[in-house]
Image (tube, coloured by chain):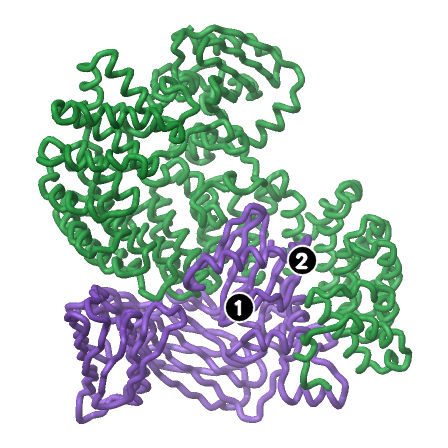
Amino acid sequence: PHTMPSNYFVDHKRGEVNELRGQLRNPKLMRDPKKQREITKKVIAYMTLGIDVSKLFSEMIMASHTKDLVIKKMIYLYLCNYAQKKKDLAVLAINTLRKDAKDDDPMIRGLALRSLCSLQLPSIVEYVIPLLRSGIKDASSYVRKTAAMGCGRLFRISPDSFRAGKWGDALRGMITDREASVAINALNTLEEVERESGGLKADAKTILPLVKRIREFNEWGQCAVLNVASRFTPTNQQQMFGIMNHLDHLLKHSNCAVVLATTKVYLNFTINFPKVHKAVIQRLKVPLLTLMSSSSFELAYTVLCHLRVLVSRAPDIFLKDYKHFYCRHNEPTSIKKIKQDIIVALAEDSNASELLNELSEYITDNPQIAKQAVHSIGKIAVKSEEAVDEGIELLLSFIDIGTDFITATTCGVLKDILRKFPDRYEDVIPSLQKVLKSVESPEGRASVIWLIGEYGETITDAPYILETLIDNFQEETNHVRGELLTATMKLFFKRPPELHKMLGRVLKAAVEDTNFVDVRDQALFYYRLLRLDPHEAGRIVNCEKAKVSAFAETQDSEINDIIFEEFNSLSVVYSKPAARFTTYRRPEIKDPVSHPGSPAQGPPRVSSPSRSLKSPPMQILHTETPLEVKREPEVKAKPAPATIDILASLADEGPEVETSIPSNPTLLLKPKLAAQMYKKKWSGLKQKNVFNAKLRTPVPGVKAIESMFRPRGIDTIASGAKGGLMKFYFYAQSAKDSSFFLVEANLEIASGKLVATIKAENTSLISEFEAEIKSALSGVV
Amino acid sequence: MFPNLFIINSTGEVLIEKHWEGKAPRKVVETFMEQQVKKERKIDVTPVIETPKCFLVHSRRGDIVLLTAINKETAPLFVLEIHNKIMQVMYHYFGPSVSSRTVRDHFSLIYHLLDEMVDGGFPFTTDINQLQAMIQPPTIVNKMMETFANSDSVKKALPEGMLTKIPWRRTGVKYHSNEICFDLLEEINCIIERNSNLSVCEIKGSIVCTCRLSGMPDITLTVTHPSLIQDAVLHRCVRINRFRRDRVISFVPPDGRFTLLTYFLRGPAQLPIFVRPSITYTDGSGNVSISIGSKMREYKAIEDIKVVIPFPKEMLSSNLTANSGSVSTVETATGHHREVHWNLPRIPQNKSPTLEGSVLFPPGFKADYRPTLVVHFNVKMWNTSGLQVDGLNVTDVKYKPFRGVRTATRAGRFHVRC
């Protein structure tokens, strides 16, 4: 009967469950342990298949009176699975479990205790507590470690009785248990329990003994200890190096999780010592490269994500290793993508030619990779002067391949290159011109149209090309329409007689079609501009374009910094800070600048403005989307988002007003407050003061306003403009007692009316703070 | 935190489902399958997928997928490494080809294992030796015992390994004939460019030990060029300080087969084989000529050679012949390419093997496809780096064990562009 267990998985009829019930009730069968085991197995099999066997609950409880450990295990599994559904019946199981929890066999004691805790029923807390009490003092380490785990489950069922019973203290005592597994379970549980407040407090008393006995723990225990240790700040350099030396052997571990956790400790410890930090990255390089090439795809991918962060942080260390990031044709697309990112990051004059060659190999890969390769080639060409010629040549050769998506992408990339090297247009224009007839995709068309607008004076038949396009204006997409409009406008000032009629037509077409609101807005804007002063309009539209010196990377360095702080976490895989995608976030209240041992060395951790700007809990207000290309001083640029007043959004993009104000005695210059804490504090403070002011119109943009406050130590946690209203959330910290000031400010864009609600932790300081705001606003009131 | 695990087969059917913290709905499996359907190749599904409610972390091995849904910030590598470990244990228990069928056949045993490996959402006993002491692998003898003596594979006692300072070795091991073998294995990963330059080359080497020794032996191993293994990844049994100080590998081994250390060598290396491909396309057809041969100074048997040549899927037919070995055309699983496989049992001494002929495409088909050949081979009694065992000492035991060392090299990711 044992040979074919797979027949558990054939299709079942309803009657099967009833038949099982009959078997479970049959005393004859149940007395034979072998049969009993068979039947129990069948029940479990059904359960895993997703068939509801909860009807058998009472029978299974009856069956749990057995000495057979295997049957016990299976029945416990069943009980835990269905306890939620059959709460009233689950209480019946408790007697058996309680009895077993006092069994002579430590294995049964542990097992019973574990199951009892995982029933997750608030009603049984009173039974569980005394058993846990004796469990944490049990002679057997197996029971002790189970009990430590059980404390965590107790916390989940009933946090109040957890706190009332001072279980946290009991667990802290268990961290020093001589048995490693008990210590680790206690540590894990404490981490879980104190997750809300940022996990177990990483003080020297807890950390040092754990680090000292790190070799006793298994790999997972080591991960747990390292996680806590990464939050620890060593008191002096000697201690720091001591711990790092002690952990060094873990970098040779075959478990990626351990290596990355160690890496995080190293990086966090040294973040304020740039030199050591570099040396550490150098030290980490080989182990990480090794992990990358030795692991399964999944692990390799995740390690690569981490390498990408390190490379962006210290490209010079990896410069010689670029070849390790060459793609293999049978690798998953995800891995190839990251490898290309890294290749681009590592490109410089000396290796550019080689890298371009390598990247051109990827053109025959799948569309995603091929497109990225075209982009990568463009990025390298822009990055390295040496590579421009070769890059352009390669790109032009791709146009002849004839695949639409490659041609389209190539056009876009060539356009970008011309923005940095405008004088290269002679090489590019002829090839692009012939492409326009064949290319289908909107991005490709838009790029070529941009080029016609830009270099139309040199292309003889430019007006005719535009004319055919304008004839089919209605068939184009939003993006292409916008570009077409701009190109016609630009060319109009270069070749007025030919374009005069055409411009009229395109403006009319754009204004009449209300389905494309931003194209329409743009057209209206041009129209008014032309009516106001045609010469001035020409000057604005065809202004001298600043050469684009570099393209903004897809992620800016501020975000990179935050991600770096969250090393060895999901953030790295997603290249965005945890707060962007998880609801839970470790509140961050670290000492901002001072690092004991070396007060002035190195930059402080991530400066708070970045954190606040991107902080998402109130992100709804922030309407700006990250831009791919740094702005040119050109009015046309991108069509402005429709709902926002054009002027306001222009001001928004204007250069930041950086005023240098000497350090301020009333407020700390770099206040530190996580968004989560902001919310908490805001709702916690009842008393509020209201501050009114009237700003000169037109009011400055969101960023400009923020930068008026920042130098004074008043930082923004969230901001944005919507529906004629700007909203700001500011915070500041008093220099006297470090108490926080929180401000919610609403500014009507049209009238310049500013209403600010101020809440202060220390209300006696509020007038001082108000004076501070007034003086910050003095320039615009 | 490792809150849950789903083991699913290729159609998304749940084979094993286990929750340690909370209960993740089965819907996550559907979400995962939706993501998978979007991709052309299954391996293109990223290991970590973001969904509105949670993150799906998965590892794929053969036709099964290990899937975990997490909703709190967790180190992704932590989850992936646990998957990895679970698979290692399954390989150990059920043999090297774990499939959805294996999982079905042994589901109750797998539940037992998972119960021990993860406790309350944290990995606990993952050491194979310890697990084995608690839960016996399903061997034929065990099955007989189960049927006749009615003892299941779960042992009743606590494993002793848990309480010792050497948790990786069980106590009381006894063998009639004691032997210890070391396999020095190397794998060549490289890309050979069109101009036959070696653009990327790395050697992944490992020392795999098969230990069948009674008692608690203490082993000291020295190698000829210790500098080669300077950056090695070591098994936890190796005494790391001794290794750093004296470059000597000293350890108390686990029982059975295990990887003692893994090392990586980067930079140019001597390759045992050369491959000279030439594929040219004219309108509607392509000419193929590929020759391979040994680059070894002295004769070493190069065996099990296989050259995989991918062609565009538009290929109508191929007319390729080889002067040695066999040629076959294979449709790839994804249908992107049609592959020609050239198999050779070994490289003959007297002639150099060549594959020649032409492939046919529809008229007017423009082939700008530049294929990458994948080459497989095995070389015994030779390794690229020249690493050798210099000395081997077994102490703390009364017997004299049989000792053996083998060397072998094979192609890992050996790619030739043409």
Res. A668 in view: no
- Give the Cα distance between marks 1 and 2: 24 Å
First of labels 1, 2 by sequence position: 1
Q: Is residue B273 left or right of residue A246?
A: left
Residue named by callout 1 = B10
Chain that bears disc 1: B
The amino acid type, in three-letter code, at marker 1 is Ser
Q: Please name whichever residue, A776 or A697, is drawn nearer the observer in this view of the structure.
A: A697
Residue A451 vs A314, above or below: the answer is above
Count of numbered marks: 2
User: In the current view of this chain or complex, which residue is farthest to the right?
Assistant: A27
Q: In the image, which lettered chain appears green?
A: A
Residue under the point 20% across and 37% down: A468
The amino acid type, in three-letter code, at marker 2 is Trp
x and y percentages locating residue B418 in the rendered image:
20, 70
Checking the image for residue B20, the label placed there is 2
Res. A18 in view: yes
x and y percentages locating residue A727 in the rendered image:
50, 20
x and y percentages locating residue B247 in the rendered image:
37, 70
Element on which disc 2 rests: loop
Chain B visual colour: purple
